[in-house]
Amino acid sequence: MLRRTLLAATAVVAAGLWAGSATAGPQIVKGPGYQPSCFKPWSDQTKFFQWKKKDGPYRIALVNGFVGNTWRIQMIKTAKTFVEQPDIKPNIKEFKVVSTGTDAAAQLGAIEDFINQGYDGIVTIAVSPEGFDRVIKLADRKDVVIVPFDNILDTDKVMMVNEDQKAMGRQSADFLLKEMNKKEGKILEVRGVPGNSVDRDRHLGFHEVMDKAGKFDIIEVVGNWDDGTAQKATADALAVHGKFDGLFTQGGSTGSVRALMDAKHPFIPMAGEGENGFRKAIAEHKNDGLKGFSYGQSPALVAIAMKAAISALEGNVMPQLISIPIPEADYTTLKDGENYWSNLTDNFFAPNEFPPCNVNIKAVDIMAKSAENTQ
């Protein structure tokens, strides 16, 4: 009888624990979500989350991986600027930044530590798309909102923020087709890092449009999203293939422009990334034939991720996977001091404005910040 009673009690406790865990973390609910013009669901199949409402202000942490390139440095500076904006600052009780390097275990340990310290929200650029199950479950048990962005995870158990890489490729193709105004010709495509999903998706989006639009000879070279590499790859392609009618550079766009100029190749319609140097070149040479289009995988993604975390903590319904608006400019819309800066370095990433999200972070404010950890 005693054993039977103990078994029954154990079952009751286990059931209670299971029920408790079932109500922890986000609940799957029906849409539409909060501010859909900013927090746009990735597709019609995207599910919606809702966390239990918490009263602010909130303790937020940014857990970065490595900090070894210009984009990451600017991203951290942007986050520090964002938390001081007048409409965000009242929601922030404490903000910390830590960069853990390329070791996935170190990043997971840092996230777990912030969870155990009682932080309310954690935004992160994942070192690896896998291995986060344990910290996600821990966060759910403690009602902590984790938001991966840029490099996201292979899971649908957490809210994530990114831009549509295929759409960037499609937009670039649409721009070239409009400016070239022809159904055949020779196009140079300067790709990114081989094997990377971003390179793959931008390439697929570009070809999705170009392959249907006419008979174009598309020459592909590898530029690794780096100005020096892209410049050399473009120069080599010009030397081998001669004249091109259009150019699509996934990154290292300033380098591709320099290669055109060094080879004395006539300026042609060109689509590329959001580097400040590329936008400066477009503004300077648009009347010489450089009809340029510049999209951006913006370091300001961190601001949207933080804004999403705050919104979720406030109890709003949020998409599990958020496709944010792609910041873009072309030779007709560039304005010095607004979407490019003639007095800043070429490798500064200019796109930091997301009007549907009320995010527009000034370059001068970003550059004044440091990229150091704040612990």
Image (cartoon, rainbow, N blue to C red):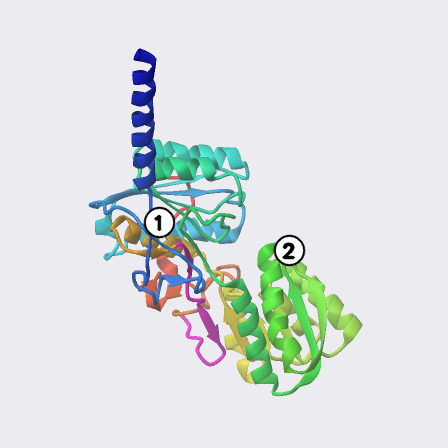
Q: Residue at x 41, y 47 (%)?
A: 158
> Residue 30 at what x, y percent from top left?
32, 58
Which mark lies nearer to you, 2 or 1?
A: 2
Residue hosting label 1 = 80
Looking at the image, is mark 2 or mark 1 earlier in the sequence? 1
Which residue sits furthest top?
2
Image point (55%, 78%), residue name: 175
Determine the secondary structure under disc 2.
loop
Q: Which residues are magenta?
A: 320-336
- Is residue 367 toward the left or the right of residue 143 in the image? right
Displayed quadrant of residue 248: bottom right
Q: How far is disc 2 from disc 1 in space, using C-alphas?
A: 29 Å
- The amino acid pointed to by label 1 is Lys
Q: Nearer the viewer, residue 19 or 103?
A: 19
Residue 186, position in %: x, y? 71, 79
Kindly indicate the quadrant of the structure image that contains residue 120. top left
Q: Does the magenta-highlighted stretch encompass residue 170? A: no
Q: Is residue 290 found left or right of 366 in the rendered image?
A: right
Q: Which residue is mark 2?
A: 193
Q: Nearer the viewer, residue 33 or 232?
A: 33
Q: Amino acid at mark 2?
A: Val
Q: How many marks?
A: 2
Give the image location of residue 174, x and y in percent.
56, 78
Q: Residue furthest front?
A: 1
Q: Quadrant of the N terminus?
A: top left
> For mark 1, does the 10 Å Cα neighbourhood hold few (<14), some (14 to 19), or many (20 or more) residues?
many
Can you say whether 180 is above or below 102 in the image?
Answer: below
Residue 372 visible? The answer is yes
